[in-house]
Amino acid sequence: MTFRLILSTIPAAVAAAALAVMPAPASAQSSKGQQYKAPRTPDGQADLQGIWEVRNSPDKDLEKAKGLIVEPKNGKIPYLPAALARKTSNEKNSAAEDPLNKCYMPGVPRINLLSHPFQIFQTPTQISIAYEYIHNFRNVYLKRDKHLDGIDFWQGDSLGHWEGDTLVVDVANFNDQTWFDKAGAYHSDQLKVVERYTRTGPDTLQYEATITDPKVFSAPWKISITLDRDTKPNARILEYECQYLADEAAKKKGN
Amino acid sequence: MRKGFLGMTAGTLAVGTILFLKPAPAAGQDTPPGPPREGGGRGGRGAGFGRGRSPLPPAGPFKRTADGKPDLSGYWNAANNGGAVFEVQKHPVARPGYPPGPGAIVDPPDGLIPYTPEYAKRAKANFDEHLADEPELHCYESGLPNQMYRQFGFQILQPAGYLVMNWEFMHAVRIIPTDNRPHGLPASTRLFEGDSVGRWEGDTLVVDTTNLNDRTWLDSAGNVHSDQMHVVERFTPVDERTINYEATMDDPKAYTRPWTVKFPLSRNMQPNYEIMEFACIEGNQDVHHYIEETGGKAKAVIP
């Protein structure tokens, strides 16, 4: 808390100097225990910019991705008993009911875990993440500290702050329409996600997300996964225009 | 389920009704008819759409980034586009859904697209018979130059080495590296927004775009281009509230000569403005979840 207060009351140059001399708190380390000192953006943020993608997308089934779910220790999503029936039915009907198969927005953290890269851009007031998947973008607001009243989002409302070199993003105001994976893991509109982005090396970024939803889960659960940078010269994300591809496929079928 | 914001109300208007969401092109008119829009108590959407408001103080000079280049970041819209969003060329006759307007073409001087005969036929066929095929009704990105005069405005972010543009409409994105790098995609890779590379010439950002696909229209009236189109844009800031925008299209398959549009981009002056989520596909496909007649909460506004 004190960290955020300092940044809001001291001019930027002084705040940047303060950042440089502060010892990196334990939370700046990823859960893999690496301590890497990321370069800085002009205004002193740890520089997370670049094109990132998971090595192996766990989107098929989060629970079957080894090492992904780090809490609880048994690697299983802690469904409330009443919620399990719905998850099972989702899984059975996945082909017809997975919102991603209708080209809907994937939600969070799912959109970070697909086989499509995303590009992080940083400014002093916002961090904007542009996704190849349906050219979605998420704006993470660094200067707003309250979620928007009475508005719900497919991708949630993202508020960001720094804990040392880790970007912490508080995502709320979700609707109940997205799934977490193809296996029907789902949530209610009480979902809250806290993401942590930490550079662990020149070309790696550790992404963690803690998922809370008292209507569906008996306890919060947490994922942790490595993102790799696209290091090709002049790399860029492309476009996955899902609806266009679906329309073209339907045309071929003669619909 | 609580109602979402503009994305839901926008998305629930499917084929044939998207015209209602287009702003009146001339300043000073009321906002166009359409469904009531929920706002987060942050002043609604007035800037750039001609709602009456007290005059702003004279504009100061534009800011610069640390490397001395003009700072184009902020929220912008192309409110005075001559009705280009309806039809980019001069359209002196009122049509169902939109009023007459000069369009946005400054060259050729007659304000009309210099079509080859084949593409003139395609444009006419679109207008006469295929308006329901408008790509925006299918929730596709709009391509160029159409994206630049799409309704609801856009955001420019200018981190080092890039110009990033985020539109509320279709959550379209353009990522433009500004380091004068070459185009790198194979000719076979075709994108809705193309491949854009930028360089500064003095205070003008020149953006060169290739690798466009032919799946976008130039406007809602069915004007078209081929996949050979190449676009050169020039963004020149005038003052802290205005960027002059110019785009030249050349396309040897569709046009007999290059043609140029020009219109100002105006800064959105609403404090604490933010881009909202646009749930186009979701709204189009799940209309029945939202409208009263089938158990939702919104009144059906499809005429």
Image (cartoon, coloured by chain):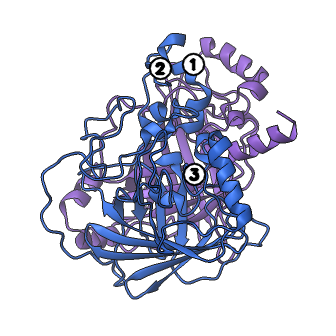
Of residues B229 and B185, the one drawn nearer to the viewer in this rendering: B229
| Amino acid under disc 1 | His
Decide: is A127 above or below A195: below
State the residue lying farthest toward the front: B93
The disc label shown at residue B300, or none: 2
Residue furthest out toward the right? A253
Quarter-wise, where is residue A54 in the image?
Answer: bottom right
Chain letter of disc 3 in the image: A
Given contact means CB atoms under 8 Å apart, are the residues at marks 1 and 2 in contact? no
Q: Residues within 10 Å of mark 3 (few under 14, many from 20)?
A: many
| Residue indicated by mark 1 | B288
Taking B22 as reference, is A85 above or below it? above
Drawn colour of chain A? purple
Dot in front, 1 or 2? 2
Q: Are marks 3 and 2 on the same chain?
A: no
Chain coloured blue in this rendering: B
